[in-house]
Image (tube, rainbow, N blue to C red):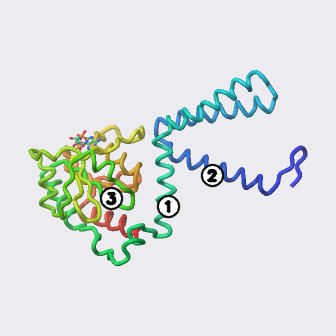
């Protein structure tokens, strides 16, 4: 295609489209976090640099060259979490689309039933803890590796039962603080520390328990069950979004649909 002063090739259009998609994905990833301000600032600086270059303003261009050159390293440090989240997002999309599992590749004999989540016990524990207003934070691992978070707490490796879950979160239990992580249908660890979200658009009444639940679902594809100590309300968190005031039946449906999506 030939415009008045520029020639536009098909590849250029594809190039522009890809950059637009990339920028949109980055925007969606940092939206609502403090990183959005940095992102806008960097983008503005980059535009100024392009204009200065196009106008052949030598001095300003050479200064901005240096700033941009060093800025890339600074950006990797500043956006460490977001880059991690972005790569995880791409990886998880690929894994879920092609139903790919390393475990399935190396242990084809291991049936899915071995790892089938005991949803009933988790829901029963949530219902009982909701009635007694016992605060709880239960992370249900899906495909993402949660070992780094499990290592911050105490390893348990026990069969899931509602009584054990209730016991772990019982106020006087030494393990009641922090999160319980459930992997491969086992209570893997308790008292775990989760990454806290920096999402500024969350309701102000969300305390640390809810922020930690949102945080882990932003960093990984895990889903989280929360029981509020203050209100007894049951919430379910997936991909950074909190669904509150769930009944036990609704919680069960949410967990089942989150795990059905993996099959
Ligand atoms: N980073 C974290 N990782 C895991 N658990 C955490 C983290 N931060 C806080 N918690 C848990 O959350 C509890 C504090 O919850 P807080 O009252 O601040 O949250 P909340 O969202 O208001 O929940 P609630 O409705 O139960 O009061 C702590 O006792 C601890 O067990």
User: SS of the residue at dot 3?
Assistant: loop
Image location of residue 55, percent across then percent down: 81, 29
CA distance for labels 3 and 1: 16 Å
Instruction: Look at the numbered discs 3 and 2 and tell me whether their residues touch, using CB distance below 8 Å.
Output: no
Frontmost residue, 167 versus 76: 76
> Mark 3 vs mark 1: which is more N-terminal?
1
Ligand 1 lies under 8 Å from the Cβ of mark 2? no
- Residue bearing the label numbered 3: 141
CA distance for labels 3 and 2: 29 Å
User: How many numbered marks have been drawn onto this rendered protein structure?
Assistant: 3
Image location of residue 11, percent across then percent down: 77, 56
Front: mark 3 or 2: 3
Q: State which image quarter holds ligand 1.
A: top left
Q: Quadrant of residue 118?
A: bottom left
Q: Residue at x 30, y 39 (%)?
A: 205
Ligand 1 lies under 8 Å from the Cβ of mark 3? no
- Residue bearing the label numbered 1: 93
Frontmost residue, 28 versus 99: 99
Q: Quadrant of residue 260?
A: bottom left
User: SS of the residue at dot 1?
Assistant: helix
User: SS of the residue at dot 2?
Assistant: helix
- Residue bearing the label numbered 2: 21
Image location of residue 105, percent across then percent down: 42, 72
Please identify the quadrant where the N terminus is shown.
bottom right
Front: mark 2 or 1: 1
Crowd around label 3: few <14 · some 14–19 · many ≥20 (10 Å): many
Frontmost residue, 254 versus 114: 114
Q: Residue at x 38, y 76 (%)?
A: 108
Frontmost residue, 262 versus 87: 87
Residue 56: numbered disc: none
């Amino acid at each position: 295609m030939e415009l008045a002063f520029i020639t536009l090739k098909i590849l250029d259009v594809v190039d522009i489209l890809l950059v637009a998609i990339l920028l949109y994905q980055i925007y969606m990833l940092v939206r609502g976090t403090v990183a959005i301000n940095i992102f806008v600032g960097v983008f503005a600086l980059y535009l100024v640099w392009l204009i200065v270059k196009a106008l052949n303003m030598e001095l300003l261009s050479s200064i901005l060259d240096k700033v941009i050159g060093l800025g890339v390293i600074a950006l990797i440090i500043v956006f460490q979490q977001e880059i991690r989240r972005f790569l995880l997002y791409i990886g998880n999309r690929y894994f879920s689309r092609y139903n790919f599992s390393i475990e399935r590749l190396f242990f084809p004999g291991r049936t899915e039933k071995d790892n089938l989540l005991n949803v009933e016990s988790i829901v029963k524990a949530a219902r009982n803890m909701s009635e007694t207003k016992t605060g709880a934070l239960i992370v249900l691992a899906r495909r993402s590796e949660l070992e780094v978070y499990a290592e911050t707490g105490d390893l348990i490796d026990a069969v899931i039962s509602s009584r054990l879950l209730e016991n772990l979160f019982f106020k006087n239990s030494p393990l009641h603080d922090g999160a319980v992580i459930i992997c491969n249908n086992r209570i893997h660890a308790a008292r775990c520390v989760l990454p806290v979200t920096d999402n500024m658009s969350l309701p102000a009444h969300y305390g640390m328990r809810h922020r930690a639940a949102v945080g882990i679902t932003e960093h990984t594809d895990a889903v989280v069950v929360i029981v509020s100590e203050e209100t007894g309300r049951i919430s379910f968190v997936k991909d950074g979004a909190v669904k509150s005031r769930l009944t036990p039946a609704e919680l069960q449906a949410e967990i089942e649909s989150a795990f059905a999506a993996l099959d």
